[in-house]
Image: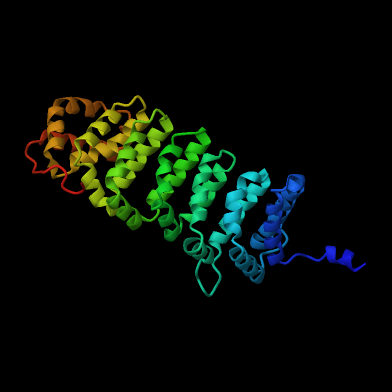
Amino acid sequence: MSFLFGRNRQKTPQDLVRAVRESISRMDVPLERRRASEDVSRLLAQMKVVLQGNAETDPIPDQVQMLAQEVYAIDLLPLLANNMARLDFEAKKDVTALFNGLLRYCPQPINRFPTVDYLHTNRPDTLITLVKGYENKDVANNCGTILRESFKHQALAHVVLYDERFWRFFDYVQGGSFDIASDAFGTFRELLTKHKPLVAQFLSQNYVRFFLKYNTLLVSPNYVTKRQSIKLLGEILLDRANYNIMLAYVDSPDHLKLTMNLLRDKSKNIQYEAFHVFKVFVANPKKSKPVQDILLKNREKLLAFLPKFHDDRREDEQFIDEKGFLMKQIIELGNQPQQPQGAVFA
């Protein structure tokens, strides 16, 4: 009768982790696939309770530690990332919860994030697998949720930013369904705004390639992509950490032409966000000659255009003041010092 009692023995955290791995391997056997999938779902739900607790119990630190250490020891996180698409809806949610719970796990008094250390040092490929998840509609949102949690940590943001797969984000934010493209843009934005010194260094090193790609978003036929992109561009250029990037961007007459076209976009929201980029060109006290020539050539048109531009924002004092400042700068064109084109980045 001892085997009957053995069945009721509660699994330890280590047992749960090993059982998940074993059940995932059984999903490759056709006759066992359904039962194995059910087992994975059940075991993941139990792991989530160990990590997060539930309505009746709080997580027990020693059990959380045992769970985490076994997850690292058998490389369960990359296994889950690679097999997430094969799991049912609830199991995908539990994988997301497990990843994010472990990413936040910070045992005291060590005050470090062991999952971050593990992914960065041992399995950075796991993050790239998650980025590839945007190519599968069944897991794209789950992968995006995990990536955004990962990017709270500079070491993990660095992994993705400097991997060749990063450049696929320019496709992800425009392709697929509205939900997936919007989720991808949210992840893209988090990556480019969370760790400012890291991003400033990356943009300096990849200036030409990045903005050649980025400018395609500003002319995208996808309205949401175009609106989000011009808004994010304004944030990037106006961030003090990106001062040298801003100087390089506003040095380009092609960038100015692109921005001026967006000022006349059929969408008022896009026009408004383009205004915040346009004002950087005009406010630059050392405009390149090609930029100043374009502004001089269009001076009369701009002075006729700006007073009517979004004149329904009469109660927005800052916007009114900014328009007045730009008009003053445009009137004084020709009296401002210039700098040679291409002074910052090649």
1 horizontally vs 235: left or right: right
Report how many numbered discs are placed on residues in the image. Answer: 0
From the top left corner, tell me how far across and down residue 158 is, in percent.
Answer: 40, 56
From the top left corner, tell me how far across and down residue 285 is, in percent.
Answer: 14, 45
View extreme (bottom): residue = 109
271 horizontally vs 11: left or right: left
* Relative height, residue 214 to residue 60 (above, below): above
Q: Quadrant of residue 72?
A: bottom right
136 horizontally vs 23: left or right: left
Residue visible at 16% across and 27% down in the picture: 298
Is residue 278 visible in the rendered image? The answer is: yes
* Relative height, residue 65 to residue 320 (above, below): below
Name the colour scheme. Answer: rainbow
Residue visible at 23% across and 39% down in the picture: 279
From the top left corner, tell me how far across and down residue 32 is, in percent.
Answer: 76, 48
| Residue placed most toward the observer, 307 or 28 | 28
View extreme (left): residue = 335
Residue visible at 35% across and 28% down in the picture: 268
| Residue placed most toward the observer, 28 or 73 | 28
Is residue 54 visible in the rendered image? The answer is: no
| Residue placed most toward the observer, 34 or 316 | 34
* Relative height, residue 201 to residue 132 (above, below): below
Q: Quadrant of residue 218?
A: top left
- Please identify the quadrant where the N terminus is shown: bottom right
53 horizontally vs 285: left or right: right
Residue visible at 27% across and 51% down in the picture: 204
